[in-house]
Amino acid sequence: MATFEKGILGGFSGKVGNVVGSRWRGKNVMRSLPQRGNYTATAKQEEQRQKFKTVIGFLNPLAGILSRYFGSPQGDKSRANLATSYHLKNAVVDTPNGMVMEYAKVLISKGDLRGIESGTVVTAAGRILNFGWQDNSGQGKATATDTLLVVVYAPDLNLYFTDTSVATRDATSASVTLPEFMASFDVEVWASFTKPETDFAAMSTYMGTVTVL
């Protein structure tokens, strides 16, 4: 792609020869026409495609959370863009069974707020997850009224449970009841803190894998 201020006849729109002219973000832009004919992706390109497909499929259901709590927009890059970039680089791995997410490296939020300290999660009958943590209010920008965010993912079902306001930081414990369809399945659990009525969040914590009772 090339940009220009003045061509022979100024900016233009449409196809001329083997280029296409248009306006993009206030600039005159020329793009070459795509090459025709058979094209076979290289092994590296196919690997990147599979990584991208895996990451996008995993993150799409979390779009609402990521678009609000994953870092801060950087120029043209939205929070969703930043989340996709992070996971492509850090949280997807190639295995003999194909691309898979590395759950311990997955982040559901990213920010400067103080995160989970001494966090625990224990299962109980009735599809209940019991969470515990240390009250670290007053450290940095952490306050007692920060709210606990929980994301639970069942890989075998490819389904999520999310709760963006489980309890306040000073509660030091809380319980969530998972939906019936998650009963008996292994699930991956993440938790974080967010500041009410803002986009401010902590770096999320991977709480591990548990079996729903």
Image: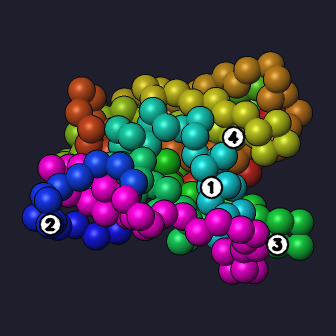
Sequence order check: which comes first, mark 1 or mark 4? 1
Q: Which residue is tagged 4?
A: 153
Q: Do the residues labelled 3 and 2 touch (CB within 8 Å)?
A: no
Q: In the shown orientation, is residue 183 left or right of residue 92?
A: right
Looking at numbered disc 3 in the image, what kind of residue is underneath it? Answer: Thr
- Residue in front for this viewpoint, 4 or 13: 13
Q: Which of marks 4 and 2 is nearer the N terminus?
A: 2
Q: Specify start and end residues of the magenta stretch as a single range.
A: 16-45
Foreground of the two, 150 or 65: 65
- In front: label 1 or label 4: 1
Q: Mark 1 points at which residue?
A: 55
Q: Which of marks 4 and 3 is nearer the N terminus?
A: 3
User: Mark 2 Cα within 10 Å, few/some/many (few <14, many 20+)?
Assistant: few
Q: Is residue 125 on the magenta stretch?
A: no
Q: How crowded is mark 1: few (under 14 residues within 10 Å), some or many (20 or more)?
A: many
Amino acid on which disc 1 is placed: Val
Q: Which kind of residue does numbered mark 2 sit on?
A: Ile
